[in-house]
Each structure stands twice: as structure tokens, then as C-alpha cells.
């Protein structure tokens, strides 16, 4: 992409020449103030190897993102006497690609400090000092020894707008053109985009860690509170039964209290399962067999509710890797919901299908109950959402969580007065 791009080089060469001339004049003034004269040789100033290692560690992300772009640029500029350079915000050269022995002698080399005060007007140092892209050709360099060279550079900025470093290209003047600046600008844009994504990703990871810690604290608190509540409920239950035996408490009222205690205990257990699920034990199971087992288990409750359960399954078993106990609980929950939705009786049709194109097993639970209003469909899987008098709002949320942990999904279709269909999708195995 970089090699074929011209990045409006005509605009760069015609519209920006005057702007570059102004920046170069200002650079010359800075060079004079630093004590340089045009006839001087560059002041060779380097950092130590130990300092360079520290600087490279601090700028490793910048180097990693810049290198692929530098290599691409190097592949399209002259092989001899053409180099691509990366420096940090302090003008320390972090990386050089390409060979130009004359430039090395002039102080443009890895671990050298290419500031204007050291080597005069140069693309990297001037780019950092001016806070903008620059192109410097031949005699525009302050030091005469650079008159045969041309350089372009663009600053690399972080998300906060601060300059992190600069990417530059140097080559012999006879091979140079303003198209080089277009290549540098395109490369810098790519580097900045990657730095931006990297920063956002790091922020997301940090936020996720804080969220996990926060969730862990909440879950631990919930476990402690649940434990204390269950202890209190056990005490209440024991005293109610004692009062029953002593004929102090009316038996019907006592049974009602014990029923409510049992219900609260179930809510606490469901919530504990939702907040801190046990480690799932995946094994290959026949979904046909799992469904038959649960249907047999629920037949008595269905008959009491005048509900007929029909099962439609393929002759050949459909297998999936599941935690049998958790999947049983999901099936039981959906069948109980269907029975409750058909207050005056009805039909629950359970279908097992195998979609070979998607690689999914589909398990449908379709009732002929009251149905769910359309406005409520988007909320029924939300934690604590319920329309039942004695509902906890945990059942469907727990079902969704279990199916999600199995790599599947659960959906719902419903029409008031017609009925509701829950569709579970699970990856099947042969």
C-alpha cells in the first residue's frame, strides 16, 4: 500500500514548500542559538548502551508497531544510501533500516541523539522541534556536510496528542522526491492507529480486571449473606416444627411458614448457582436420553396440570458434550414454566432436531399457554424479571447462563393467547 501510494505528492510539493521554508528558517535560527555554524561538523552525541536498553524497553510498543512499516518503506527506496529511521521524543535513534555509511559518520545512527543542537537542521530533529511533518532537501540543511542528502519525517503522536517519536527517511538527494513524505505520513498514520487500538485494548483489559475483582467481592458478599440467611431459616424452620409438635402453632399456618422457608431457600440456592456456578463437567451424552429422562420425571406434574407432553425426536440419537445435571435442570425449568403457563391444561410439544448445516442440535419446548406480550419478550431472560406471584426471576436467567456456558444459545418466540416456544441451540458431536 505504501509503495504504490502518491499521497497527493503534487499538493505536498507545491502547497507546502513555503511552509517548509518557514520551518527551516526557524530551525536555522535555533541552530545558530545553539552555537552551530554552517561549516561545523556534526556534534556526535550518543546515549550509553545501558541507557539505550532502558529507552528501548520504554518504547518497545512503538518499535513493534513501526517496524513493519519501516520494512515496507525500505523495500521501495534505493537499496544503497537509503535509510529509514525511528527516534523517540528526545531524538534518540531507536532503529535504523538500510545502509548509509556516510550518514553514520555524520551522526545519524542508532543510539545517536539527532537533535538540532547536535547535527543542525535535519528531518528527525526538526520534525520533533517543530511538532509537524518536514521535508529537508540539500542546502536546506544547516550544516553544509549534509548538502548531498534529503530527508523527510513525520511525528508520531499518542492518543493524548503528545509526540512519542518520529519516523524519517534519508537518501541521496538525486534519488529523493516529496513522495517520500507521503510514504512517511501513511506509515505514521498506520502506527498511530495501532497505538490507539493498543491503548484502548489495554484500558478495556484494566477495566475488565477491575470488574472481575468487583464481581468477585460481590459474589463473596452474596455467599456470606446467603449462608447467614440459610442459618436463620434453619433456626426458624426448627422452631416452627417444635411449635407444631407442642400444638402451640396451628398446623396449617405452620405448613405455610415452612413452605415459604423452603421457597426462600430455593431462591438462595438458585442465586448461588447463578452467581458462582460449579465447574461444569462436560461429557458426551445423548440428548434423546436426557430429554426422555426429564419428561418421565415431569409426567406426574404434567398430569396434575392436565398437560399432555408430546415428544418428537429423530430415531438416531443426537449427541452433545454437556454437563448432565445442569442440562437436566434447564429442561425441568422450561417444562415447569410451560405447565404453569397452561393453567387450564394444554399440550407441550418437545422437539429435538439436528441441523447439519449449522452443526447445531435444536431443542424446542412449545406450549399452548397464555403467551408472553411482545413488550416483555426482551426482558424474560433478565435477572429477577418475573410475572409470577411466587417467581424469583432466576429460572430463565439461570437457563440462559447454563446454555451460554455450553457454547449455545436460547431464544423465545411467543404470541398472546396462542402459546410460547423456547428454542435451545447446542453444538452437537458425532
Image (tube, rainbow, N blue to C red):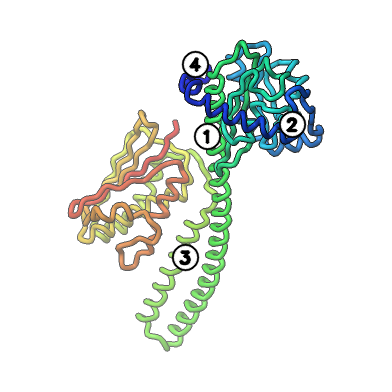
Say which label, 2 or 3, has the lower sequence index.
Answer: 2
SS assignment at label 3: helix
Say which label, 1 or 4, has the lower sequence index.
Answer: 4
Say which label, 1 or 3, has the lower sequence index.
Answer: 1
Whether residue 7 is visible to the viewer of this picture, yes or no, is no
Looking at the image, which is closer to me, 277 or 250? 277
Residue 4 - label: 4
Looking at the image, which is closer to me, 310 or 82? 82
For the point 67% across and 26% down, the residue is: 122
SS assignment at label 2: loop
* The furthest residue to the bottom: 248
Say which label, 2 or 1, has the lower sequence index.
Answer: 2
What x and y, as percent, mark residue 30? Answer: 68, 34
**Alpha carbon of mark 1 to alpha carbon of mark 3: how far?**
48 Å
Question: Callout 1: 10 Å neighbours few (<14), some, many (20+)?
Answer: some
Residue matched to label 2:
113
Q: Is residue 338 left or right of residue 63?
A: left
SS assignment at label 1: helix
Which circle, 2 or 3, is nearer the viewer? 2
**Alpha carbon of mark 2 to alpha carbon of mark 4: how far?**
32 Å
Residue 193 - label: 1
Residue 103 - label: none
**Alpha carbon of mark 3 to alpha carbon of mark 4: how far?**
65 Å
What x and y, as percent, mark residue 181? Answer: 55, 23
Residue matched to label 3:
268
Amino acid at each position: 500500500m505504501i509503495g504504490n501510494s502518491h499521497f497527493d505528492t503534487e499538493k505536498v510539493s507545491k502547497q507546502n514548500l513555503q511552509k517548509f521554508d518557514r520551518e527551516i528558517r526557524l530551525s536555522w535560527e535555533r541552530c545558530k542559538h545553539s552555537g552551530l555554524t554552517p561549516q561545523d561538523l556534526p556534534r556526535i552525541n550518543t546515549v550509553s548502551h545501558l541507557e539505550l536498553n532502558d529507552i528501548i524497553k520504554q518504547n518497545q510498543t512503538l518499535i513493534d508497531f513501526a517496524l513493519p512499516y519501516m520494512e515496507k518503506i525500505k523495500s521501495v527506496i534505493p537499496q544503497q544510501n537509503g535509510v529509514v529511521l525511528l527516534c523517540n521524543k528526545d531524538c534518540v535513534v531507536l532503529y535504523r533500516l538500510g545502509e548509509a555509511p556516510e550518514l553514520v559518520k555524520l551522526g545519524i545512527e542508532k543510539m545517536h541523539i539527532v537533535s538540532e543542537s547536535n547535527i543542525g537542521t535535519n528531518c528527525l530533529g526538526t520534525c520533533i522541534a517543530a511538532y509537524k511533518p518536514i521535508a529537508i532537501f540539500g542546502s536546506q540543511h544547516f550544516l553544509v556536510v549534509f548538502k548531498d542528502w534529503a530527508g523527510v519525517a513525520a511525528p508520531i503522536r499518542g492518543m493524548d496528542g503528545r509526540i512519542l517519536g518520529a519516523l524519517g527517511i534519508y537518501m541521496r538527494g538525486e534519488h529523493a522526491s516529496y513522495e517520500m513524505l507521503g510514504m512517511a505520513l501513511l506509515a505514521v498514520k498506520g502506527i498511530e492507529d495501532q497505538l490507539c487500538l493498543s491503548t484502548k485494548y489495554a484500558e478495556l483489559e484494566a477495566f475488565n480486571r477491575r470488574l472481575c475483582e468487583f464481581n468477585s467481592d460481590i459474589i463473596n458478599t452474596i455467599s456470606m449473606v446467603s449462608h447467614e440467611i440459610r442459618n436463620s431459616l434453619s433456626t426458624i424452620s426448627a422452631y416452627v416444627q417444635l411449635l407444631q409438635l407442642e400444638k402451640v402453632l396451628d398446623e396449617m399456618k405452620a405448613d405455610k411458614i415452612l413452605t415459604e422457608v423452603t421457597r426462600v431457600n430455593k431462591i438462595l440456592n438458585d442465586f448461588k448457582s447463578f452467581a458462582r456456578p460449579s465447574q461444569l463437567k462436560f461429557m458426551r451424552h445423548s440428548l434423546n436420553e436426557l430429554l426422555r429422562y426429564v419428561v418421565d420425571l415431569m409426567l406426574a406434574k404434567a398430569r396434575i396440570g392436565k398437560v399432555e407432553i408430546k415428544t418428537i425426536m429423530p430415531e438416531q440419537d443426537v449427541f452433545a458434550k454437556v454437563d448432565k445435571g445442569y442440562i437436566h435442570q434447564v429442561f425441568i425449568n422450561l417444562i415447569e414454566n410451560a405447565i404453569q403457563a397452561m393453567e387450564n391444561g394444554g399440550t407441550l410439544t418437545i422437539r429435538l432436531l439436528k441441523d447439519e448445516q449449522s452443526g447445531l442440535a435444536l431443542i424446542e419446548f412449545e406450549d399452548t399457554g397464555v403467551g408472553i406480550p411482545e413488550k416483555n419478550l426482551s426482558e424474560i431472560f433478565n435477572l429477577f424479571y418475573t410475572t409470577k406471584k411466587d417467581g424469583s426471576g432466576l429460572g430463565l436467567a439461570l437457563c440462559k447462563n447454563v446454555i451460554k456456558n455450553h457454547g449455545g444459545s436460547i431464544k423465545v418466540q411467543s404470541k398472546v393467547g396462542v402459546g410460547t416456544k423456547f428454542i435451545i441451540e447446542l453444538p452437537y458431536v458425532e
